[in-house]
């Protein structure tokens, strides 16, 4: 009888170990991360061992890759191209007026714009808005002075695989993605990530 109990206990421990290993090794997808977003920030998971990911000459959306170039217009008709900002630190943010976390982080983005040398490109998801007047009113109400390109056809949001609002990419002076986040960021977190960029 004692042997049977020991075998059952050992089998249970082995089963639990296998279950725990499989559950811990599953990486969440972007969709799963987006579904879990509330008011908290969700950032890309750190690489094993806390090592910085090597920079790549290839274009892509992962940390270390070159951010895909794009060209959009602002409310004033000014043309904005991401590659024109090479040599500068860039905070690329995707937002909409109807998004409460976007509204919450905008004052912190304005503060970052005024207190650092980072260039902010706050891409409005214009294709999801009821009209340009709403976007202009939002910018005027919050007294935003950073650049707001308009993504009228959602092409750039699709190119950057935006699945949550807001989504932020921090791009270093060489054009590589340094950091990405799904969800609102605080001023302190933005500043911390900007300071880490070379």
Image: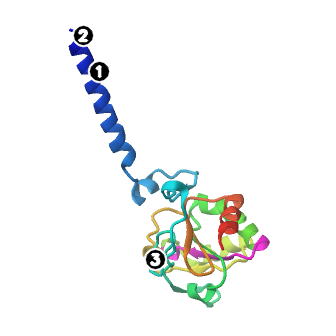
Mark sitting earlier along the chain (2/3): 2
**Residue position for label 1:** 9
- The residue lying at 34 percent from left, 35 percent from top is 17
**Residue position for label 2:** 2
- The residue lying at 76 percent from left, 72 percent from top is 116
Q: From which residue to which does the magenta span run? A: 114-127
Residue 119 among those drawn in magenta: yes
Q: Is 151 situated above or below 77?
A: above
**Residue nearest the observer in this picture, 26 or 140:** 26
The number of numbered badges drawn on the structure is 3
Residue 94, image quadrant: bottom right
Residue 196, image quadrant: bottom right
Q: Are marks 2 and 1 in contact (CB under 8 Å)?
A: no
**Residue nearest the observer in this picture, 19 or 131:** 19
**Residue position for label 3:** 154
Q: CA distance from mark 3 to mark 1?
A: 56 Å
Q: Is 83 situated above or below 142?
A: below
Q: Is label 2 in a helix, a strand or a loop?
A: helix
**Quick one: quadrant of the N terminus?**
top left
Mark sitting earlier along the chain (3/1): 1
- The residue lying at 50 percent from left, 84 percent from top is 69
User: Where's residue 156, x and y in %?
Assistant: 47, 78
Q: Is residue 132 left or right of residue 3?
A: right
Q: Is label 3 in a helix, a strand or a loop?
A: loop
Q: Are marks 2 and 3 in contact (CB under 8 Å)?
A: no
């Amino acid at each position: 009888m004692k042997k049977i109990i020991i075998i059952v206990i050992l089998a249970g421990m082995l089963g639990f170990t296998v279950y725990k290993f499989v559950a811990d090794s599953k990486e969440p997808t972007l969709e799963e991360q987006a579904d879990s977003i509330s008011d908290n920030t969700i950032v890309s998971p750190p690489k094993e061992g806390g090592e910085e990911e090597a920079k790549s000459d290839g274009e892509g959306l992962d940390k270390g890759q070159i951010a895909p170039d794009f060209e959009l217009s602002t409310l004033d008709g000014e043309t904005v191209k991401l590659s024109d900002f090479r040599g500068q630190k860039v905070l690329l943010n995707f937002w909409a007026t109807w998004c409460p976390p976007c509204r919450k982080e905008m004052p912190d983005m304005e503060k970052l714009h005024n207190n650092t040398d980072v260039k902010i490109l706050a891409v409005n998801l214009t294709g999801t808005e009821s009209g340009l007047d709403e976007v202009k009113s939002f910018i005027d109400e919050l007294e935003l002075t950073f650049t707001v390109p308009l993504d009228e056809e959602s092409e750039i949001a699709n190119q950057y695989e935006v699945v949550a609002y807001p989504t932020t990419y921090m791009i270093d002076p060489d054009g590589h993605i340094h950091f990405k986040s799904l969800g609102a960021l605080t001023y302190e977190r933005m500043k911390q990530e900007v300071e880490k960029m070379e």
